[in-house]
Image (tube, rainbow, N blue to C red):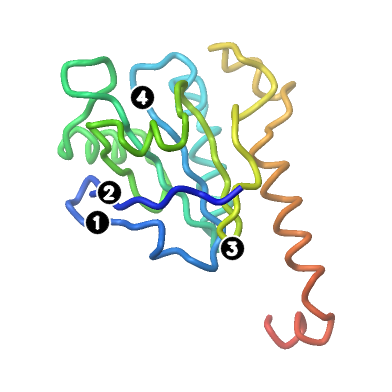
């Protein structure tokens, strides 16, 4: 399934367009800092570890706040910067979508709603972060992390598609 394109400002005022990341894996993470499920994954450092692990492998990680002004979870650019610093996040950018246009284009109704786009621009995963839909951080170790599984599988497939000789040279 092809992905809807978009351009959004980040917490520092820089505009990010999905087209800027053509040819890369991109994770879209819908975010509400007040959501108990978001707090579960950030409070335990689970999300930060995922972000750091995959951005270090060249994956672009775009966290998106699609909450409208006056609703729970809506944040200003300044609040977004404080959250990123205070929560020690490792995403590529925290994008602000206060009119919810991008959230609606992707059908994001929950947080964290996760989407993985492959280098060909196709959505390869869309849904929950893991198999335990609870706000309890103690459930993380026993759950299946769908995002990690989908990224690991996609990255392994991509790597195995490169001839062995090219892989050695690319290192």
Q: Tell me whether circle 2 and circle 1 mark residues in contact (CB < 8 Å).
A: yes
Residue 147 numbered mark, or none: none
Circle 3 is placed at which residue position? 119
Residue 38, quarter of picture? top left
Q: Residues within 10 Å of mark 2 (few under 14, many from 20)?
A: some
Q: Indicate the position of residue 97 as horizontal and vertical percent values.
A: 27, 37
- Dot 3: what SS? loop
Decide which of tag 1 and tag 3 comes sooner along the chain: 1
Residue 8 numbered mark, or none: 2
- At x 73%, y 65%, the residue is 158
Q: Residues within 10 Å of mark 1 (few under 14, many from 20)?
A: some
Instruction: Give me the C-alpha separation between circle 3 and circle 2.
Output: 20 Å
Circle 1 is placed at which residue position? 15
Q: Indicate the position of residue 42 as horizontal and vertical percent values.
A: 46, 28
- Dot 1: what SS? strand
Instruction: Give me the C-alpha separation between circle 3 and circle 4.
Output: 27 Å
Q: Residues within 10 Å of mark 4 (few under 14, many from 20)?
A: many
Point out the image quarter for the C terminus: bottom right
């Amino acid at each position: 399934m092809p992905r809807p394109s978009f351009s959004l400002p980040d917490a520092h005022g820089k505009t990010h367009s999905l087209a800027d990341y053509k040819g890369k894996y991109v994770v879209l993470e819908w975010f509400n800092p007040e959501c108990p499920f978001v707090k579960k994954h950030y409070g335990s450092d689970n999300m930060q570890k995922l972000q750091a692990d995959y951005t270090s492998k060249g994956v672009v990680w775009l966290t998106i706040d699609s909450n409208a002004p006056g609703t729970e979870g809506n944040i200003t650019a300044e609040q977004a910067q404080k959250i990123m610093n205070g929560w020690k996040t490792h995403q590529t950018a925290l994008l602000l979508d206060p009119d919810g246009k991008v959230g609606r284009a992707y059908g994001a109704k929950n947080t964290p709603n996760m989407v993985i786009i492959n280098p060909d621009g196709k959505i390869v995963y869309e849904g929950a972060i893991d198999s335990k839909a609870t706000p309890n951080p103690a459930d993380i170790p026993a759950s299946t992390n769908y995002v990690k599984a989908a990224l690991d599988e996609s990255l392994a497939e991509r790597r195995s598609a490169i001839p062995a000789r090219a892989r050695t040279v690319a290192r």
